[in-house]
């Protein structure tokens, strides 16, 4: 069976190593905080929090503690707070080792589209444009296909780009793929998913 949202987040947490400073995007990436476990990982939120803990248990939510997606989270003993300018200084200054982001589309060249669907009102690209330009590694978590069954891993993105050639690794419900010079390389398949299943669901070049 393909991975569900939590299994995708758990798989993404395996990418993180002790000592890393990591930014989690909105959507599925926020679930990664629940699977860090005993690793010495510091999670950074661009709305001004360094050292995010997992989601709170029901009834223990603090409305003042939220991530960039406006979800309530918990703090740790080492958590620190700062303004948006300092937060983006960390990102633009290359202090964040990795960003785990959601996406609407990713191209075989690593182009990322994750901020706008034409015709829908959005207020701007947001912090993603800084993240993909400033962090050491960009990992995308996304469903392999859209609700119509069309591939979201494309030869060329059709939606407005967040960044060109910025994605390093893609984790979907079908498996894990790396962006290479020749296209996408399958690194791992979800349990019960065959190479043929993944290739059939992918428009991008598989090498």
Image (cartoon, rainbow, N blue to C red):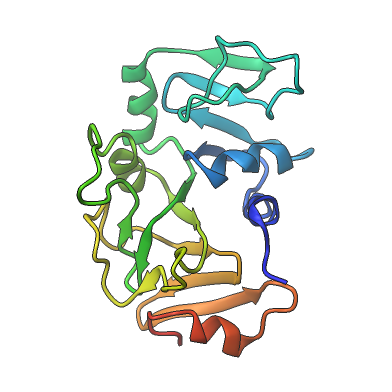
Which residue is the extreme one toward the right?
38
Q: Give the percent coordinates (x, y) of residue 124.
A: 23, 35
Please indicate whether residue 177 sits to the left or right of residue 104 in the image: right
Q: Is residue 187 above or below residue 11?
A: below
> Residue 191: image x %, image y %?
74, 74
- The answer to whether 106 is drawn above or below residue 98 in the figure is below
Can you tell which quarter of the image residue 187 is in? bottom right
x then y, percent, for residue 13:
66, 49
Q: In which quarter of the image is residue 83?
A: top left
- Please give the name of the residue rendered at 48% of the width and 38% of the height, measured from the top-left corner: 26
The residue under the point 56% across, 81% down is 198
Query: Could you tell me which residue is drawn at 61 percent across and 71 percent down?
Result: 175
Count of numbered badges drawn on the protein:
0
Q: Is residue 151 left or right of residue 128?
A: right
| Quarter assignment of residue 2 | bottom right
- Please identify the quadrant where the N terminus is shown: bottom right
In this rendering, is residue 62 above or below 124? above
Picture quarter with the C terminus: bottom left
* Residue at 47% in and 63% down: 147
x, y percent for residue 86: 36, 19
């Amino acid at each position: 069976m393909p991975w569900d949202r939590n299994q995708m987040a758990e798989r993404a947490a395996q990418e993180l190593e002790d000592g890393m400073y990591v930014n989690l995007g909105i959507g599925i990436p926020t679930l990664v905080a629940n699977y860090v476990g005993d690793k010495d990982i510091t999670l950074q939120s661009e709305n001004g929090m360094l050292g995010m803990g997992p989601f709170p248990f029901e009834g223990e939510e603090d409305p003042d503690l939220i991530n960039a997606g406006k979800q309530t989270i918990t703090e740790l003993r080492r958590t620190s707070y700062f303004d948006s300018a300092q937060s983006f200084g960390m990102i633009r200054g290359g202090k964040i080792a990795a960003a785990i982001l959601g996406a609407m589309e990713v191209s075989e060249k690593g182009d990322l589209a994750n901020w706008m669907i034409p015709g829908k009102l959005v207020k701007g690209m947001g912090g993603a444009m800084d993240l993909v330009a400033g962090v050491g590694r960009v990992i995308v978590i996304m469903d392999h296909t859209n609700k119509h069954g069309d591939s979201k891993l494309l030869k060329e993105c059709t939606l407005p780009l967040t960044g060109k050639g910025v994605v390093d690794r893609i984790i979907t419900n079908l498996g894990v793929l790396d962006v290479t010079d020749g296209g996408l390389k399958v690194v791992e398949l979800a349990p019960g998913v065959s190479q043929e299943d993944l290739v059939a669901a992918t428009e991008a070049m598989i090498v």
